[in-house]
Image: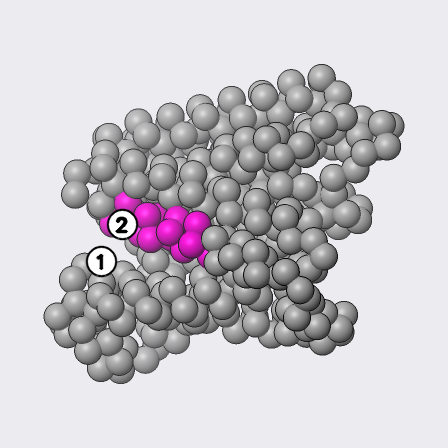
Amino acid sequence: MHEWIGFSFVVLAGVVTGSYFLGLKYVEPWKWENIWLVYAIFALLVMPVGLALATAPHLWAAVSAAPSGDLSRVLLYGAGWGIGSVLSGLGVVRMGMAVGVSVLIGVDAAVGSFVPMAVNTPDMITEKKGMMVIIAVFTLLLGVAVVGFAGKRRERSQALSGRRIQQGSLAAGLIICILSGIFSAMMNFAFAFSGSVSRAAMSFEASESGALNVVWMITLLGGFIPTGLYTGYLLTRNRTWKNYLFPRAGPFWLIGFGMALLWYGGVLFYGWGAKGMGRTGAVIGWPLFMAILILTSTVCGFATGEWKGASTQAKRWMGAGLSILIVASIILGTANQL
């Protein structure tokens, strides 16, 4: 695969993944834990296991042949990502889609890019390509800071007009989103540090993409552990298991499936694209993926009315933040061509 094709796949991944949060807006009277468990069952269990079975011959033999230490690390990275995933849903509910996703993804981009670069390609740090990646990530973080400021201005203007999007305090939502970003970066660690697991799958006749599906299966199985435990706890504490028995709840299950399809599709596109970008795919691809995801989620936030009642000044700040994110994406695109 040519590098620009891989780059395009990563952009597509950001667009697809950036829109999956929309499902959270259309499931009343279900609660967050109801829709999140449905989404998680499809996205973290059914889809990855099904695709791995379909594309990796002798799947269980391949998994057994992988080094146990490396297999455990991929599973643990997945569990860490699962913690971040749970926190992301809680943070977005409190901050709104446009701002919440921007903050957590900005942190995710920085951590997820710098760690693989320092471990896998330390020589890149002093090269022109590495310097451009560093500049791009800091540009992305600047864009996220501006977007966060825009969100604060939006909160003030909407409070004056009697309209609020987020639930709970902005400070609590901000802390949750930052922690979510740190943990969520572990998804890229699982991809970047899973070479031995992929090789084990290919030794049992799996193609390169099939081997990657095995990595995602292990990662997402790890991710389901904290997700399933936490949503199960909430369903029990809040006595919301009964919501699954509501009449006319069928569309909510379809929404959960649609969220899973968008999110898992984005994971697949990212994996294909980052692989196609070569040895620096995990370094350049991850912040690019995050930047496009932010842009998409923000457009979705505007389209669904999150910014109604916001001041013109708040919208201008948001426009400035998005412009900075576009610049960061252009820098990453340039670095990819070096």
Nearer the observer, 24 or 119: 24
- Give me the C-alpha separation between circle 1 and circle 2: 7 Å
Q: Which residues are magenta?
A: 260-275
Task: Tell whether position 230 is magenta.
Answer: no
Evaluate if marks 1 and 2 touch, with contact meaning CB atoms under 8 Å apart: yes
x, y percentage for residue 257? 48, 58
x, y percentage for residue 238? 76, 70
Task: Tell whether position 263 is magenta.
Answer: yes
Question: Residue extending furthest front?
Answer: 247
State which quarter of the image contains the C terminus. top left
State the residue at coordinates (29%, 36%): 8
Q: Is residue 76 visible?
A: no
Ranked by sequence position, the earlier of labels 1 and 2 is: 1
State the residue at coordinates (72%, 69%): 240
Q: Secondary structure at mark 1?
A: helix
Q: Is 118 above or below relative to 236?
A: above
Horizontal arrangement in the rendering, residue 81 relative to residue 89 (left or right): left
State the residue at coordinates (41%, 30%): 329
Residue occupied by mark 2: 272
Residue type (three-letter) at the residue carrying disc 2:
Trp
x, y percentage for residue 210? 22, 63
Examine the residues drawn in magenta and state their main secondary structure.
helix
Residue occupied by mark 1: 209
Colour scheme in the image?
Answer: one colour
State the residue at coordinates (64%, 53%): 27
Q: Is 163 above or below relative to 251?
A: above
Q: Is residue 209 visible?
A: yes
Q: Quadrant of residue 78?
A: bottom left
